[in-house]
Every structure is written in structure tokens, then in C-alpha cells.
């Protein structure tokens, strides 16, 4: 679940540029190199500890795999409640959940319970999007590969967390297409909510029960669950407020579990990575594994991004208070898992990438990058804090000046009075428009105004406060002036 930052002009472009470079870095990779069995894991421990200090990360768990065996498991930092992070600490894996949903769909296809190329309406006759013709064209494969034509920018519904899978599928009747079906990759979480509902319909089981019986149990993933609402011993998740970690209860939208809210541990995820690296461990046939790892548009297969003709297969996950990464290098028999209990949007783009790159350096036998390379999320947060403090000092002065505005307004010409009032609305409106334009340009089809503003308070609370403090007082001044002017004109008529 990736929600979008709003960044003010002036300092907005540099931060947007940083996030863009970080986002591009999510997909960058280099060729495999030396083996890792003899790697200096003590050096890796020191580098990860330094990255945690640099960014103020609460906790990290990792698993490293080579030659189809787990060669390293380690936890760092705190899970909350005075508990350390270990490879057995439960954390949300975000959109890595999609790979489990895709695998379950592949199993049902092999069992003859659904056809990947069949329209969704074959199995859900009432399935509808806003375009009636497109409703009949969207297939199961389109959902798997995010080519349904649906996207966040065409879907403005905000579902309650207790909405069911069926309710989320029915809500798509309000979703307009932003691309013709099958022509463009547009990552859209509700594609996988529909797939989760299909799993329930075609298997006759709940989504959680099917995943447990057909994926978790065969792989020995004893501490993983697709029913996170009932789970215990989950790590404390964190967001940030001006660079400081703030504990927050992780919201769990029931309808979004197949897309991004499975719970697991680093050790279980290592078993899963091993299975995926070695042909599926019998969960599906080799032929189906080839389909899963065959890229469609924009390198996306069935729940995985595939690069370099399969040399790198990966997926990341971003929850409100957790982050995750699974990188597979099947030709080299290598993989790694990364789980972090921090979900601020800047961390997903910046700090998690830096930690992930360090692990990849070890897995691929490269020299580790200096800790000084890259931005510090902690320092970025402190910078936002200083800007906010400046606004906290500046904005009350404008509000206090309203005390004598009525008297001063009497000495202004009509033109100057109109300009004075207009400025109170014009400045914050221009700022907001520039911020929204930057965000829309950066996120493209994943940008939608109202859902973004609602979600922003969870994953970017500091920017949300900064935006409120920077804009709201100006509007208050404008409405005060309008009310005062109207009151003055009314008293004159009386």
C-alpha cells in the first residue's frame, strides 16, 4: 500500500528528485559475482547497525540464501515492548503478499478450477467497472499482471477497514478505466483483492485458510498467517514525526490482505524464497512456475517483477508501519529477505533502499558502500521539523494582525482591499496547486487526490502537519476578512 508525499515548492523539487532516484533504485541491479558463504557477516552486521543509527530505524530482520540453503539469519534493534527483533519476529510483508495470492491462483488454475485467460465475469457474473464493455474484457491474467486498465487515479472510493473482499470487488463498479484493457501496466492493489475473492469462490475456503493449507503448511511457514487480525506477538510498527520514530497501530484493511497485509517472519520468508528459487518446491508444476516468472508489461509477471530475463526476480512491500523486500537470483541459487518495522514513506524510498543495497552487495559479492552514501531519513525529518517550526512562528503573526484589520481596511481603496483579501486565498491555493501538480507528475496513475490526503496522515504525518500549518491559517485569514467586510456592508445598509 504506497501512499504519496506532498512537498512544498522550493524544497519540494529536491525532495521529489531524491524520492524519484530512490524509486528508480528499487529496480536497479548489477550482475552476480562472488559467492557469499565466506562473506564477512560481521561486517554486514556493522553496516546494518550503522544504517539503523543513520536513519533511526527501530528494527530490521534479514535472511540470506545461497546454494538452496539459508546461510544467514539475523535480527537487529527493537520490536517494541522491550523485545528485540529476531528472525522469528512477526512483521507485515506489504505487497510481497501479492506473490502468495498469485501462487494460489496458479494452483487453482492447474487444478482446473479456473482459466487464467477467462474473463473475470466467468466466475463473478456481477463483476463490473464503470465501463460496461471493459467489464467483460478483464481476465484473470490481466489482474495478475496489473493490466486490467484500472488504477488509483480512476478509483476514488475509500473503503472502511472492515470491508470484505466481496464489498471491495463490488466497489469497482465506480472505477473508471485509465487505460484500455491489456495495454498498459498500472499497479493497482484492488486487482489482487479481486484475485483474493476468486480464490475464495473457486476453492470454497476463506482466503486465509487456503493460503495456510496450500502454501504456508507445505513450506513449514509455521509463523505466517493471512489472518493478521487474530495474530499475536507482532512487532510494534512505526511511522515518523519529523525524523523521530512514533509507534502506531498497524491498520489492517480486511479487503486488502491478499494485496498487502500477510504477516510473516524472516525465517519463514527465507523458506518461501528457497521454494521460489528452486522451481516452486512442488507447489505448482515447472511449467506454471515459468508462467509466474514470465514478465508481461513493465517486467511484471504473476506477483513478481522480473528483470534481466529472470536473473533478478523481486518484490517489495510498503505498509503504513512496516516494509519488506524479497530478492531472488535463481540462476545463482541466491536470495535474501528484508523486513523492517518502519513505514514512513521516506523510509520506503530511502532508508530501506540503502539497507537493501547493503544486503545485495553481500549476496552478489560486491564491496559494501560507505555509510555516508545517500540521504539520511532522520536528517530529512529534522529539516521538515525546522521548516514547520518556522511556520509555527510566522503564521500566528498573520493571525494576530487581524485584530486591527477592520480599521486598516477603512483606509484602503476598493482595489487594494480586494487584493488584500484575494492574497489570503491566492497564496495558499497556488502553493496547494503546485504541490498537487508535483505529486501527480511524480506518481502518475497512482495519484488520486482524496484517498491520498486521507492516507497521508498515516504515512507522512509530518508533511501532513506542515501542509496544514502552511496553508490553513491563510484561508482562515481570508474568510475572516470576507466575513468582516460583509458584516461592515450589512451594518451600513441598516
Image (cartoon, rainbow, N blue to C red):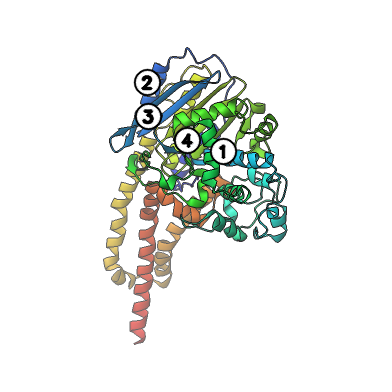
Secondary structure under the numbered disc 2 in the rendered image: helix
Nearer to me, 494 or 177:
177
Nearer to me, 106 or 36:
106
Q: Which of marks 3 and 4 is nearer the N terminus?
A: 3
- Which residue is at a point 55% across and 58% down the rendered structure image? 167
Mark in front: 3 vs 4: 3
Q: Earlier in the sequence, mark 2 or mark 1?
A: 2
Secondary structure under the numbered disc 3 in the rendered image: loop
Q: Name the residue under label 1.
A: 214
Circle 2: is it few (<14), some (14-19), or many (20+) Cα within 10 Å?
Answer: few
The residue at the far bottom in this view is: 494
Q: Mark 4 points at which residue?
A: 324
Secondary structure under the numbered disc 1 in the rendered image: helix
Q: Name the residue under label 2.
A: 46
Q: Mark 3 points at which residue?
A: 86
Apparent side of residue 434 relative to residue 470 in the rendered image (left or right): right
Give residue 352's position: percent from left, percent from top.
Answer: 45, 33
Amino acid at each position: 500500500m504506497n501512499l504519496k508525499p506532498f512537498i512544498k515548492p522550493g524544497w519540494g523539487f529536491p525532495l521529489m528528485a531524491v524520492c524519484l532516484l530512490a524509486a528508480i533504485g528499487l529496480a536497479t541491479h548489477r550482475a552476480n559475482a562472488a559467492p557469499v558463504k565466506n562473506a564477512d557477516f560481521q561486517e554486514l552486521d556493522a553496516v546494518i547497525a550503522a544504517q539503523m543509527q543513520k536513519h533511526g530505524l527501530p528494527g530490521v530482520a534479514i535472511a540470506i540464501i545461497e546454494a538452496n540453503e539459508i546461510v544467514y539469519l539475523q535480527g537487529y534493534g527493537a520490536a517494541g515492548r522491550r523485545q528485540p527483533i529476531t528472525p522469528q519476529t512477526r512483521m507485515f510483508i506489504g505487497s510481497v503478499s501479492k506473490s502468495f495470492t498469485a501462487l494460489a491462483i496458479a494452483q487453482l488454475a492447474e487444478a482446473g478450477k479456473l482459466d487464467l485467460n477467462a474473463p473475470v465475469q466467468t466466475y463473478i457474473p456481477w463483476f463490473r467497472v464503470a465501463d460496461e464493455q471493459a467489464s467483460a474484457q478483464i481476465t484473470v491474467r490481466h489482474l495478475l499482471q496489473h493490466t486490467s486498465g484500472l488504477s488509483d487515479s480512476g478509483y476514488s472510493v475509500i473503503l472502511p477497514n472492515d470491508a470484505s473482499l466481496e464489498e471491495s470487488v463490488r466497489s469497482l463498479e465506480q472505477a473508471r478505466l485509465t487505460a484500455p484493457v491489456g495495454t498498459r501496466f498500472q499497479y493497482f492493489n484492488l486487482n489482487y483483492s479481486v484475485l483474493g475473492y476468486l480464490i475464495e469462490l473457486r476453492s470454497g475456503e476463506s482466503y486465509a485458510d487456503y493460503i495456510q493449507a496450500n502454501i504456508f503448511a507445505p513450506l513449514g511457514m509455521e509463523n505466517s498467517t493471512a489472518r493478521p487480525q487474530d495474530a499475536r506477538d507482532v512487532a510494534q510498527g512505526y511511522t515518523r514525526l519529523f525524523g523521530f520514530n512514533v509507534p502506531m497501530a498497524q491498520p489492517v484493511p480486511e479487503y486488502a490482505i491478499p494485496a498487502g497485509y500477510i504477516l510473516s517472519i524472516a525465517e519463514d520468508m527465507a523458506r518461501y524464497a528457497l521454494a521460489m528459487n528452486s522451481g516452486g518446491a512442488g507447489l505448482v508444476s515447472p511449467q506454471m512456475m515459468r508462467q509466474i516468472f514470465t514478465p508481461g508489461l513493465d517486467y511484471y509477471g504473476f506477483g513478481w517483477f522480473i528483470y534481466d530475463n529472470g536473473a533478478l526476480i523481486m518484490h517489495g512491500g510498503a505498509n503504513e508501519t512496516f516494509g519488506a523486500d524479497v530478492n531472488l537470483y535463481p540462476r545463482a541459487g541466491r536470495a535474501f529477505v528484508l523486513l523492517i518495522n518502519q513505514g514512513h514513506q521516506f523510509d520506503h524510498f530511502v532508508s530501506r533502499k540503502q539497507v537493501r543495497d547493503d544486503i545485495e552487495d553481500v549476496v552478489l559479492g560486491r564491496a559494501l558502500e560507505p555509510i555516508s552514501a545517500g540521504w539520511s531519513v532522520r536528517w530529512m525529518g529534522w529539516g521538515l521539523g525546522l521548516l514547520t517550526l518556522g511556520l509555527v512562528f510566522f503564521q500566528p503573526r498573520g493571525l494576530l494582525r487581524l485584530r486591527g484589520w477592520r480599521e486598516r481596511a477603512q483606509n484602503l481603496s476598493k482595489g487594494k482591499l480586494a487584493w488584500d483579501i484575494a492574497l489570503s486565498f491566492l497564496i495558499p491555493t497556488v502553493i496547494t496547486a503546485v504541490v498537487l501538480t508535483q505529486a501527480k507528475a511524480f506518481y502518475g496513475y497512482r495519484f488520486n487526490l482524496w484517498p491520498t490526503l486521507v492516507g497521508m496522515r498515516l504515512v507522512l504525518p509530518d508533511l501532513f502537519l506542515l501542509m496544514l500549518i502552511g496553508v490553513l491559517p491563510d484561508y482562515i485569514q481570508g474568510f475572516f476578512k470576507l466575513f468582516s467586510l460583509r458584516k461592515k456592508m450589512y451594518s451600513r445598509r441598516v
